[in-house]
Amino acid sequence: MSEVQSQPNQQNRDNAPTRDAIYIGKKPLMAYVTSTLIQLANQPSVTIKARGLSIGRAVDVSQIILKRMENAGYAVGDIRIGSETVQAEDGRTRNVSTIEIEIKRNS
């Protein structure tokens, strides 16, 4: 009976938007650094996610947090790289690289 109850909870968690992820786009670099630091004040870990040309900016955000805030006690957790298939404007499918960098507080 407990298995039946736990499965819907797992599905609800998968469908709910995660608040522990920062998606990197075209905003100024320090906007993402500030947003990540605010999330780290409330969460034990935050995942910085980017794809395509934003991957370099995601790495920059993680390095700024680690190097400039080294006394605050943050560390890099898992780093996951991969690719996604997306539909281009001309109708063709193409692969886009992705990265997920986990930043966590040291206890």
Image: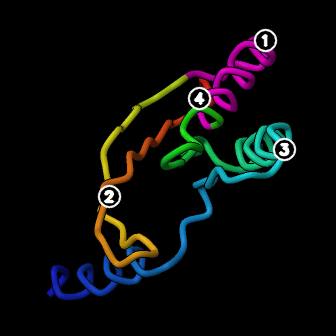
Q: CA distance from mark 2 to mark 1?
A: 36 Å
Identify the disc placed on residue 84: 2
Residue kind at label 3, given as amino acid type: Pro
Mark 3 and mark 4 residues within 8 Å of each other at the beta carbon: no
Q: Amino acid at mark 1?
A: Asn
Q: Are marks 2 and 1 in contact (CB under 8 Å)?
A: no
Position of the N terminus by quadrant: bottom left
* Inter-mark Cα distance, 3 to 4: 14 Å
The residue carrying mark 3 is 28
Q: Which one is in front, 30 or 43?
A: 30
Which residue is under mark 1?
71
Is residue 76 shown left or right of residue 36?
left
Which numbered circle lies on residue 59? 4
Amino acid type for the residue under numbered disc 4: Val
Image point (46%, 42%), residue name: 100
Please indicate whether residue 60 sits to the left or right of residue 5 in the image.
Answer: right
Q: In the rendered structure, which disc, 4 or 2, sits on the residue that comes first in sequence?
A: 4
